[in-house]
Amino acid sequence: AIGPVKKICCIGAGYVGGPTMAMIAHQCHDIEVKVVDINAQRIAQWNSDELPIYEPGLDEIVKGRRDQNLVFTTEVDEAIRDADMIFISVNTPTKTFGVGAGRAANLEFIEKCARKIAEVSIGHKIVVEKSTLPVRTAEAVKAILAEATSGATFDVLSNPEFLAEGTAVDDLLAPDRVLIGGESDAAVQALVEVYAQWVPRERLLTTNLWSSELSKLTANAFLAQRVSSINSISALCEATEADVDEVAMAIGMDSRIGPKFLKASVGFGGSCFQKDILNLVYLCEYFGLPEVADYWQQVVTMNDYQKRRFVHRMVRTMFNTVSDKKIAIWGFAFKKDTNDTRESAAIYVCRDLLLEKARLSIYDPQVTKAQVVANLEAVFKNGDQEISNVSRQLIENNVEVVSDAETAATSAHAIAVLTEWDEFATADFEKIRELMQKPAFVFDGRNTLKSLGLEKLGFDYQGIGFSR
Ligand code: NAD
Ligand code: UGA
C-alpha cells in the first residue's frame, strides 16, 4: 500500500527543480524535501545568500524553508534511498551528436538518474518525471527500474512542469493546471495529495502516462507557434503600414483566439521552446509523419528568420553599414525578470552584428560579463570543439559589458533593445540622446519604448511590426 508522501528527493537543482521543490516545502511543512545535484557549485549557491537563479519572490520562499524541510545537498544516493517519491528534474538538451543530432532530446542524464535510482533504492518508490521528455520515455525508465537487483519496486508518473521563468513563483503558487500522468491510481493519488495542499482540486488533471508526456511538448509547441505566427505578421505589417500591436489586439479580443502570447518580438528564446519543438519534429519523423514534422519545423524556421530580419533592418537603416559603429545592446536575457540567457535572441543578434564588424556595449541588469562571453563563444564555436582565434579576437576586441544602460549608450550610433526590462522605459532619453552619435537610432526588439514618443525627442525609432 502507498501511504502519504513524507520524504521527497528531487534530482536536479536547476531552474525547475529548485523553485518547484521550494514551493512544495513552503506549502507542505510535513514533507521533507531534499534537492540533489552532481554540480557541487550549484548546491553551494542554493545554500548561500545568493541563489543561483534570479526569480522574483524565490529568495523569500527558499530562505524561509531552507534547513527546515528544504535541503540542498550533493548526497544523491542517501537522498534517493530515504525518499518515498523521487522527482527527476535534470536537463534534457538537444542532442549535439550522433543519430538525431540537432533535434532529438539527449536523454543521457535521464537514463543515468533511472540507473542510479535502480542501483540505490530499497522498498517501494514513486518516480516522477518532472523534466520535459519525448513521449514514451517512461517506457525506458520503467525498463531500467525493473532491473533493480535489491528487489525495490517502482511506480512511474509523468508530472511535467509548466512554469515560465521570470514568473516561476506565481506560476507555482497558482498554476492553470497541474498535470499528472500514471498507470497506478494509488501512485497518482499520492502525488495529487501533495499538490492538493495548495492547488484547487479542479486544477489537478490526471491522464494516462503518454498523454501527460506528450502534452508538455504540445503545450510549448502551441505557445511558440503563437509567437511565430504573430512575428510572421510583423514582417507583413512593416511592409504595409499596419501595426502588429493593433493587429494583435484586434485578433486577441476574439475569445476563440485570446490575448496572451501575441506579443511580436525579436524572436522567442529560452531553454525550452526551440529544443522542445525540434524534439517534437524529430518524434514525428521517427513515427513516420513527415507532414506533421514539417508543420512544426516552420515555427523554428520563422523564429530564426525573425532574429536575422532584425539585424538586416538595423544594417539597412544605418546606411547599409554598422562596421566600426558602436551599438548599445540593452538586455541580454531571453525575457525580463530572469538571469537566464539560454537561446536568447540577443546571442544571435549580437553574433550577426559582430560579423558585420560592429562594436557592442552590452548592459543587462542580471547578466554577468562572463555569461555574455560564454554565450557568444559558444555560438561562434557552432558545434566545433574549439573556438577559432579569429572569432575569439572578434569577441574580445568588440564586446564590452557595462553596468548601466546610459554607459552602454554613450557615443553609440544605435541602441538595440533586446529584453523588455521595465527599467529601460524609464531611462532619461533626453540625456541619452545627448550622449549618442547622431542620427541617434533606436531599434526596439520588444516595442517597450513604443509609447514614449522617442521620435519627438529626435531619435530615429523603429520597433517590430510597424513603420512610422
Ligand atoms: P538546468 O540545467 O537548470 O538544471 C538541471 C540540473 O540537473 C543541473 O544542475 C545538472 O547538474 C543536474 N543534473 C544533471 N544530471 C544529473 C544527475 N545524473 N544527477 C544529479 N543531477 C544532475 O535545467 P532546467 O531548466 O531546470 O530544466 C530541467 C528540465 O525541466 C528540462 O527537461 C526542461 O526542459 C524542463 N523544464 C524547464 C523549464 C524552465 O523554465 N527552465 C520549465 C519547464 C520544464
Ligand atoms: C515557456 C512556457 O511559457 C512555460 O509554460 C514552460 O514551462 C517553459 O517554456 C518550459 O518548458 O521551459 P519560458 O521559456 O520560461 O516558458 O518563458 P516564456 O514566457 O514562455 O517566453 C519564451 C520566449 O517567448 C521569450 O523569449 C519571450 O520573450 C518570448 N515571447 C513570449 C514573445 O516573444 N512574445 C510573447 O507574446 C510571449
Image (tube, rainbow, N blue to C red):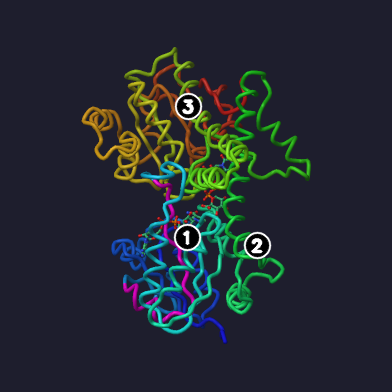
- Counting residues from the start of the chain, the first of labels 2 and 1 encountered is 1
Q: Position of residue 343 (x, y in %)?
A: 44, 42
Which quadrant: the C terminus? Answer: top right
Image quarter where ligand 1 lies? bottom left
In this rendering, would 224 be left or right of 390?
A: right
From mark 3 to mark 2, how far is it between C-alphas?
Answer: 36 Å
Mark 3 lies on a secondary structure that is helix
- Sequence order check, earlier mark of 3 and 2: 2
Q: Secondary structure at mark 2?
A: loop
Question: Which residue is at the front of the view, 281 or 337?
Answer: 281
The location of residue 90, given as percent across then percent down, is: 42, 60
Residue 80 lies in the magenta-colored region: yes
Q: Is residue 127 visible?
A: yes
Q: Horizontally, is 378 left or right of 141 in the view? A: left
Q: Nearer the viewer, residue 151 or 335?
A: 151
In the picture, residue 88 is in which quadrant?
Answer: bottom left
Which mark is on residue 16? 1
Q: Is residue 400 above or below residue 185?
A: above
What residue range appears in magenta? 75-95
Cβ of mark 3 under 8 Å from ligand 2: the answer is no
Kind of residue at disc 2: Arg
The type of residue carrying mark 3 is Arg
- Quadrant the N terminus occupies: bottom right
Number of disc labels: 3
- Please say whether residue 86 is one of the residues in the magenta stretch: yes
Q: Position of residue 426 (x, y in %)?
A: 51, 39
Marking on residue 308:
3
Residue 436's x, y, as percent? 40, 23
State the residue lying farthest toward the left: 389
Residue assigned mark 2: 177
Name the residue located 59 percent from the left edge and 27 percent from the top edge: 453
